[in-house]
Image: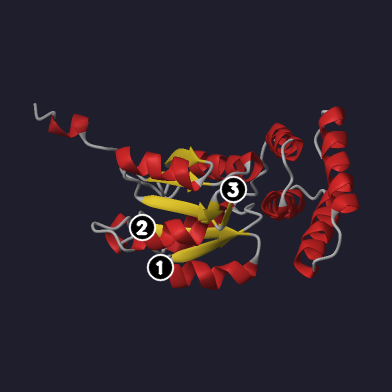
C-alpha cells in the first residue's frame, strides 16, 4: 500500500480557504487582534501575534509567515517602517498588508511596499479572506473568490477590557506628548471598533487638541476617567 500521502499537508478548501497559511499579526489592540484570531480560526490559518515593531522583528528572526498584517499605528513606531523593511527583503513574504481604521494611512502603507490594505473594524469574514486570497498565487487559491462565504465576526468583549487595562497602565506613567498621541490614536481606533462612542469622541478630541497645540490636561484627565470607568464596570461595551 502506498502511504506517502499520509504525511502530506491538508489542502485548502472553500470552507477553510487559508488552510496551510501562517499569518503574523502586528497589532497592539487585543480587541482588534481577537477579531483576526477568529477569522483565522474560521479560515484554517495559523496565527501569531506581535504587539509592537520590536516584538515583530523578534518573531521574524525565527519564523517566516506567508502573510503579515501590520497595524499602521504601533507603540514604538509606524507600521510603514516594518512594511518598508519587509518589502525590500529577498525572499519576500508573499502577502504584506497594512491595517488601520484611518483611510488616510492606506497610501502610506502602499507607498512603503504593502500588497494591500485591510480597513478596521474587521467584521466581515469574506472581506478578510478575499483580500488575502486575491494576493496569493492562483495555484494557492482553493476556489473562486465569489464562492467565499461571509460571516460577521464579533471579538470577545474581554479583549476590550484588556485594551482598557493596557491604556490605564500607559496613562499611569509619564504622559508626555508622544504618550498622549499614542493614547489618542489607540483609543480612537479601538473604541470605534467596539462602538464605544463616548470614549471614541473623547479620544478624538484629545487628538485634535494635540494637533492644534491646545491645552490637553483636562481632556487627558477625562480620557483617563472614562478608561477607569470601563475597567470598574467589568462588563462588555
Which quarter of the figure has residue 175?
top right
Which of discs 1 and 3 lies nearer the camera? The answer is 3
Q: Can residue 55 be seen here?
A: yes
Residue drawn where x is 31% and y is 55% of the image: 140
Among numbered discs 3 and 2, the one appearing first in the sequence: 3
Q: Which of 52 and 8 is in front in this view?
A: 52
Q: Can residue 44 be seen here?
A: no
Where residue 73 sits in the image (x, y, percent)? 59, 55
Q: Residues within 10 Å of mark 3 (few under 14, many from 20)?
A: some
- Looking at the rendered image, the quarter that the C terminus falls into is top right
Looking at the image, is 125 positioned above or below residue 135?
Answer: above
Q: Given contact means CB atoms under 8 Å apart, are the residues at marks 1 and 2 in contact?
A: yes
Where residue 29 sits in the image (x, y, percent)? 63, 43
Q: Mark 2 points at which residue?
A: 86
Separation of disc 1 and disc 3 at Cα? 21 Å
Q: Mark 1 points at which residue?
A: 113
Q: Mark 3 points at which residue?
A: 75
Amino acid at each position: 500500500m502506498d502511504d506517502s500521502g499520509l504525511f502530506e499537508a491538508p489542502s485548502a478548501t472553500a470552507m477553510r480557504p487559508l488552510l496551510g497559511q501562517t499569518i503574523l499579526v502586528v497589532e497592539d489592540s487585543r480587541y482588534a487582534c481577537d477579531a483576526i484570531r477568529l477569522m483565522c480560526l474560521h479560515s484554517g490559518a495559523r496565527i501569531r501575534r506581535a504587539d509592537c515593531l520590536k516584538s515583530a522583528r523578534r518573531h521574524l528572526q525565527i519564523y517566516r509567515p506567508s502573510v503579515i498584517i501590520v497595524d499602521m499605528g504601533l507603540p514604538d513606531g509606524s507600521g510603514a517602517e516594518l512594511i518598508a523593511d519587509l518589502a525590500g527583503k529577498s525572499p519576500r513574504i508573499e502577502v504584506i498588508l497594512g491595517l488601520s481604521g484611518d483611510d488616510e494611512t492606506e497610501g502610506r502603507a502602499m507607498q512603503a511596499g504593502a500588497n494591500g490594505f485591510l480597513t478596521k473594524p474587521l467584521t466581515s469574514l469574506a472581506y478578510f479572506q478575499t483580500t488575502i486570497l486575491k494576493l496569493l498565487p492562483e495555484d494557492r487559491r482553493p476556489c473562486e473568490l465569489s464562492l467565499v462565504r461571509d460571516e460577521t465576526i464579533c471579538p470577545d468583549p474581554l479583549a476590550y477590557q484588556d485594551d482598557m487595562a493596557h491604556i490605564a497602565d500607559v496613562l499611569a506613567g509619564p504622559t508626555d506628548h508622544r504618550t498622549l498621541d499614542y493614547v489618542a490614536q489607540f483609543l480612537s481606533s479601538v473604541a470605534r471598533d467596539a462602538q464605544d462612542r463616548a470614549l471614541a469622541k473623547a479620544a478624538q478630541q484629545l487628538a485634535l487638541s494635540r494637533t492644534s497645540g491646545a491645552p490637553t490636561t483636562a481632556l487627558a484627565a477625562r480620557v483617563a476617567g472614562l478608561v477607569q470607568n470601563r475597567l470598574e464596570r467589568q462588563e462588555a461595551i
